[in-house]
Image (cartoon, coloured by chain):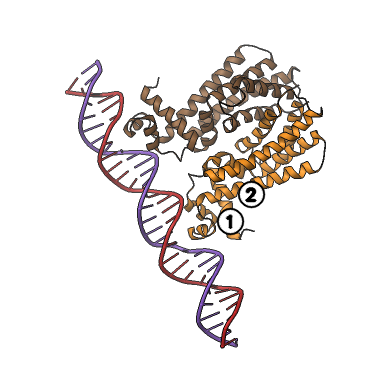
Chain colours: A brown, B orange, C red, D purple
Amino acid sequence: MPSATEQKIIDAAVRLFAAQGYDATSVQEIVAAAEVTKGALYHYFRAKDDLLFEIYRLLITSQSADMDRIIGLGLSSADTVREILVSLVVSTAERVDETAVFVRELHRLGEDRMTEFRAERRRYHETFLAVIEKGQADGSFSSGVPADTVVRIALGVVNQLPIWYRPDGPKPPGLLAEEIADFVLAGLR
Amino acid sequence: MPSATEQKIIDAAVRLFAAQGYDATSVQEIVAAAEVTKGALYHYFRAKDDLLFEIYRLLITSQSADMDRIIGLGLSSADTVREILVSLVVSTAERVDETAVFVRELHRLGEDRMTEFRAERRRYHETFLAVIEKGQADGSFSSGVPADTVVRIALGVVNQLPIWYRPDGPKPPGLLAEEIADFVLAGLR
DNA sequence: GTGGGCATACCGACCGGTCGGTAGGGTGGT
DNA sequence: ACCACCCTACCGACCGGTCGGTATGCCCAC
């Protein structure tokens, strides 16, 4: 349970990292935006890249939980894929800043954390993959295109979303999510 | 026509920016990797971010040329989309480093160049969009999913490619390209 | 009175960019 | 044939400034 100060620091860091990038954002800027001091920041975080790690952890934890919950519902393959995509697109649209930081600055993580991270990411990837492969095996989906390529395509849009999605744009997140799900499911027919 | 020295500098910069990011790469590292001196670098480039701009320019110029050439062939809508995607995926796979830098560090460009750049990018996007809309209008493609969403999905995979594609991986670029094209075309049925 | 939660002053490292200078090949006047 | 002149390509020491991180101590709740 993060303290109010801790939360303000993370919020400011997300905003600034998304707008300017990790390296281009100084610790001074973060503490100014969060209205705290450097002492406070280094009281809660050991180093600047602890902030990055925390941002990633928060994001991936909630996304994994979402997917696990949906799979647990026991829907048909098609409905499972649809629900996973819709929930992923909507939650990503709600957290564009976090996602932008995640996509752009992943490589800045140290070796240890990078490894830990890839494992988590891989688990997510493979869980989704298994859903599609199951649908292909029982005939719900076409096997025309290998499942791993389908997963890459589906996750590709989502990760690129911060580049073009604007909360005040013409399409609300829900509609966008349905369109993406429709297209992916059409490709799996 | 760039001199040999200039080329060595750009090659080194691409490699290092892709591996570590723009800000995390010092000018010293670049000149060391390129086996030239700082004087040489600042003889050819006015500032560090001229390197970024040059990398982007090279990439987008060749991609635009590819697409224009394909459209000029006058193929059917389906074949045009297929050829565009295959050529884009293959050329991106050949230049993963450039693409990684492009995707990750675009926001680091100054205001003027950013504007110039968005215009070029938008042109590319809309040319592709027009191809798909034409296919939807003449009945070659389904109109189930709006064309702009299809473009976002297709370009999404390509831009994410540097994250997971490995030249020594199991699938050669050509096969990957065909799979992606197959899936997109299946979604457009 | 003592320890968690900060504030403030400060440090050394490093960074992008500059600048005075040089090496060497072309060129035109004589 | 020669040399004065210049220009491009390049060298590398150096600078002002910023950065991430630390050392030290106050202060208030318990």
Q: Amino acid at mark 1?
A: Lys
Task: Decide which of B154, D16 is in the foreground and name it.
Answer: D16
| Cα–Cα gap, marks 2 and 1 | 15 Å
Label 2: how many residues lie within 10 Å, few (<14), some (14-19) or many (20+)? few
Q: Could you tell which of marks 2 and 1 lies nearer the N-terminus? A: 1
**Residue B68: which quarter of the image?**
top right
Check disc 1 and report the residue beneath it: B8
Dot 2 falls on a residue whose secondary structure is helix
Q: Residue at x 54, y 45 (%)?
A: B112
Where does the image place residue B74, in percent across and percent down from the top left? 82, 40
Check disc 2 and report the residue beneath it: B58
Q: Chain of mark 1?
A: B
Q: Are marks 2 and 1 in contact (CB under 8 Å)?
A: no
**Residue A171: which quarter of the image?**
top right
Q: Residue at x 67, y 40 (%)?
A: B123
The C terminus of chain A lies in quadrant: top right
Q: Is residue A138 above or below residue C29?
A: above
Question: Is circle 2 on the same chain as circle 1?
Answer: yes
Q: Chain of mark 2?
A: B
In this rendering, does residue B150 appear at all? yes
A176 on left or right of B67: left
Q: Is residue D20 above or below residue A56?
A: below
A117 on left or right of B125: left
Q: Amino acid at mark 2?
A: Leu
The N terminus of chain A lies in quadrant: top left
